[in-house]
């Protein structure tokens, strides 16, 4: 294989683009893709304060690296979720990345700040860990960004993530999530911060290649709670299609943005009000996060008590 730009030996092949690039030109390709996405969807400008939600995985660290390389003084936000050794490695990796680049990193420990971890919350509520984890992330990303004066929250969602989410929404015809799914979600309420996904045109493999060529150390293993998640099933199905027909993921998601999403914009927007407990935007009297927190506090063991064992 030869690089499309300089005809030197290629380091990365992109079948869906029918092209290949040497290391320097591949890094340029990824940076150009991100810059185009930011410009196309008016995600943010030089004057905006950008907060990157950083997990310690390849996508979020690559996004943070790309933004810093492009001259944006982006800060990172890492949530410590209390998922055993996985969370410890994630925090250490994120911290090392920030230290190497002299970038600001905000860390939020769920257990010390909220009184529970994701596993504890799952046990208390008798619900899958991912449901409580996702709710915590959405709420805290927005609240911390708002409280600290950031204009935009940027996440490392890639093409695989977006295509899998779209497949799930279409299979179950979830029209409200379909209406909200977008590379850039504007702040529709004073209590909301704009959410953007600058890497939505790049695949997981492409972001892994970027990290490899840049020497970015990241947590390679999946979250242990992700085992059996439907998103993995959808990604596997899409990967099988992509292997036989390169470019299918891009056509699927871009087709949604170009053809279906404009038709959904005419639907009535949901009216938001302030949560009676925390003041964050919600559709009901209290937000889902506060309802979850109340249930967790109600059912969690009281200090000094022990659980009874029957039998």
Image (cartoon, grey):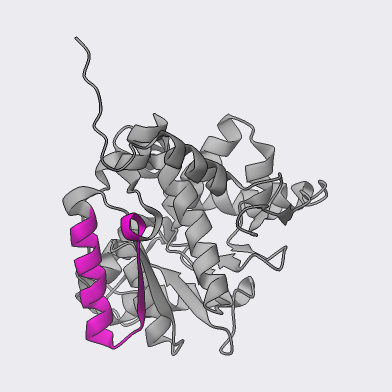
Depth order, front residue of 280/10:
280
Q: Quadrant of residue 94?
A: bottom left
Q: Residue at x 28, y 64 (%)?
A: 56
Q: Residue at x 34, y 39 (%)?
A: 302
Picture coordinates of residue 128 (x, y %)? 38, 33
Provide the major secondary structure of the magenta segment.
Answer: helix
Quarter of the rendering occupied by the N terminus: bottom left
Q: Residue furthest front?
A: 304
Span highlighted in magenta in the image: 87-112
Horizontal placement of 125 versus 223: left or right? right
Horizontal placement of 190 versus 34: left or right? right
Q: Is residue 245 visible?
A: no
Picture coordinates of residue 249 (x, y %)? 48, 48
Picture coordinates of residue 142 (x, y %)? 54, 64
Q: Is residue 88 magenta?
A: yes
Q: Is residue 7 visible?
A: yes
Quarter of the rendering occupied by the C terminus: top left
Q: Count of labels shown?
A: 0
Q: Is residue 94 magenta?
A: yes
Q: Is residue 202 above or below residue 69?
A: above
Q: Residue at x 31, y 83 (%)?
A: 6
Horizontal placement of 254 versus 54: left or right? right
């Amino acid at each position: 294989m030869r690089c499309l730009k300089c005809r030197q030996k290629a380091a990365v092949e992109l079948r869906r683009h029918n092209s290949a690039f040497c290391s320097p030109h591949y890094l340029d390709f990824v940076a150009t893709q991100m810059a185009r996405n930011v410009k196309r969807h008016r995600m943010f400008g030089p004057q905006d304060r950008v907060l990157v939600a950083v997990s310690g995985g390849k996508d979020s660290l690559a996004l943070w690296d790309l933004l810093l390389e492009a001259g944006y003084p982006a800060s990172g936000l890492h949530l410590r979720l209390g998922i055993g050794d996985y969370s410890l490695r994630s925090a250490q990796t994120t911290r090392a990345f920030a230290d190497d680049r002299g970038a600001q990193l905000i860390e939020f420990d769920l257990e010390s700040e909220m009184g529970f971890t994701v596993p504890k919350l799952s046990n208390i509520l008798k619900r899958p860990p991912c449901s409580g984890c996702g709710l915590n992330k959405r709420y805290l990303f927005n609240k911390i960004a708002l409280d600290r004066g950031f204009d935009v929250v940027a996440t490392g969602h890639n093409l695989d993530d977006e295509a899998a989410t779209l497949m799930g929404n279409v299979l179950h015809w979830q029209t409200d999530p379909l209406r909200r799914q977008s590379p850039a979600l504007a702040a529709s309420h004073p209590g909301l911060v704009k959410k953007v996904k600058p890497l939505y045109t790049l695949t997981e493999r492409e972001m892994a290649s970027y990290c490899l060529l840049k020497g970015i150390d990241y947590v390679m293993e999946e979250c242990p709670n992700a085992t059996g998640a439907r998103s993995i099933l959808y990604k596997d199905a899409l990967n099988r299609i992509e292997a036989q027909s390169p470019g299918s993921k891009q056509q699927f998601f871009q087709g949604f943005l170009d053809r279906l999403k404009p038709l959904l914009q005419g639907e009535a927007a949901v009216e938001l009000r302030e949560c009676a407990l925390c003041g964050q935007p919600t559709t009901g009297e209290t937000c889902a996060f506060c309802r979850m927190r109340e249930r967790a506090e109600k059912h969690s063991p009281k200090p000094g008590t022990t659980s009874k064992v029957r039998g």
